[in-house]
Image (cartoon, rainbow, N blue to C red):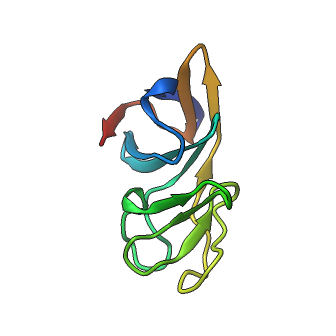
């Protein structure tokens, strides 16, 4: 399986602290903007398989909190910061080029955006 860089959004589509769920092939990904930085994580909480895209971002701590049970995940490495989660969620490389946001996922090619 090869990795491919895929455009997921225009850089100005999200405000700082905003979250969007994007679909890349069959993978659901959370795209988060904090200031001028973008982060991409799997859209599934490792604790109970709920969507993280409905969670809240802490821009100072660079965390995303699952709306269902309150588990916090680092935007930097996907590691859980609080219980009840004990396992990390996958994170994906993000690049901004020419006003476009790209995420690299293994073997993915098609994208959709959900708001």
Residue 83 shows in the view:
yes
Who is closer to the viewer here, 38 or 41?
38
Q: Position of residue 99 (x, y in %)?
A: 55, 17
Q: Where is residue 79 in the image (x, y as percent from the top left)?
A: 66, 68
From the viewer's perspective, tell me whether residue 90 is left or right of residue 19: right
Residue in the image at 30% along x and 41% along y:
114
Who is closer to the viewer here, 17 or 111?
17
From the viewer's perspective, tell me whether residue 115 is left or right of residue 22: left
Q: Quadrant of residue 78?
A: bottom right
Residue 96 in the image: above or below residue 88: above
Q: Which residue is the extreme one toward the top? A: 98
Q: Position of residue 106 (x, y in %)?
A: 56, 42
Quarter of the rendering occupied by the N terminus: top right
Q: Which residue is the extreme one toward the bottom? A: 84
Residue in the image at 68% along x and 61% along y:
61
Residue 23 in the image: above or below residue 4: below
> How many discs mark residues in the rendered view?
0
């Amino acid at each position: 399986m090869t990795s491919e860089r895929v455009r997921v959004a225009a850089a100005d589509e999200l405000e700082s602290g905003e979250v969007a769920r994007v679909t890349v092939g069959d993978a659901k990904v959370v795209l988060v903007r904090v200031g001028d930085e973008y982060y991409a994580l799997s859209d599934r909480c490792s604790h109970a398989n709920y969507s993280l895209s409905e969670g809240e971002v802490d821009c100072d701590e660079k965390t995303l909190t699952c709306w269902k049970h309150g588990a916090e995940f680092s935007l930097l490495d996907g590691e859980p910061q609080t219980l009840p989660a004990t396992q990390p969620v996958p994170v994906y490389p993000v690049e901004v080029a020419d006003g476009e946001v790209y995420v690299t996922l293994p073997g993915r090619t098609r994208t959709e955006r959900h708001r």
